[in-house]
Amino acid sequence: MNRILTAAIFATMLAACASGTDHYKSASEAKAKLANDYNAGRFKDVIADADMLRKAGALDAMAQLVIGQAYFNAGDFPGCVRYAKTVNSNDARELQARCAYEMGEASHP
């Protein structure tokens, strides 16, 4: 009976992982994942972490700036401009200007 229960729990956990359910419920866990993804150079994952941070109540100004920088580092300059426009800080405006500049440079090799 215990093995059946263990197998059922394991199967449920696997299904949750496969369905994309995030397991980062606390703000500190969400921020740790963001930092780990950024430091590992997984910039697309950093961008995807925004929703998880929002759900955990951890999407503060610093996290938003890191996400904007991830767009830049991933080479998604139009995405960077769009995202930076939603963040109200001088740093975000500087990032937006830099991304806009890079967009212009990319179109004029």
Image: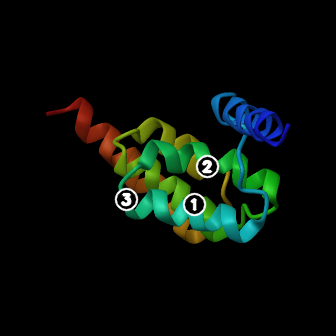
In the foreground, 56 or 6: 6
| Residue at image point 64% right, 29% down | 18
Query: Is the Cβ of the residue at disc 1 closer than 8 Å to that at disc 2?
Result: yes
Indicate which disc, 3 or 2, sits on the residue closer to the N terminus: 3
In the foreground, 80 or 44: 44
Please count the marks in the image: 3
Residue 107, picture quadrant? top left
Q: Work out whether residue 95 can be spotted.
A: no
Q: Name the residue under label 3.
A: 40
What is the secondary structure assignment of the residue under circle 2? helix
Q: Quadrant of the C terminus?
A: top left
| Residue at image point 81% right, 51% down | 55
Say what amino acid the circle numbered 3 marks: Ala
Q: Work out whether residue 8 can be spotted.
A: yes
Indicate which disc, 1 or 2, sits on the residue closer to the N terminus: 1
Q: Residue 49 carries which label?
A: 2
Q: How crowded is mark 3: few (under 14 residues within 10 Å), some or many (20 or more)?
A: few
Say what amino acid the circle numbered 1 marks: Lys
Work out which residue is located at the far front of the displayed protein and give it.
Answer: 1
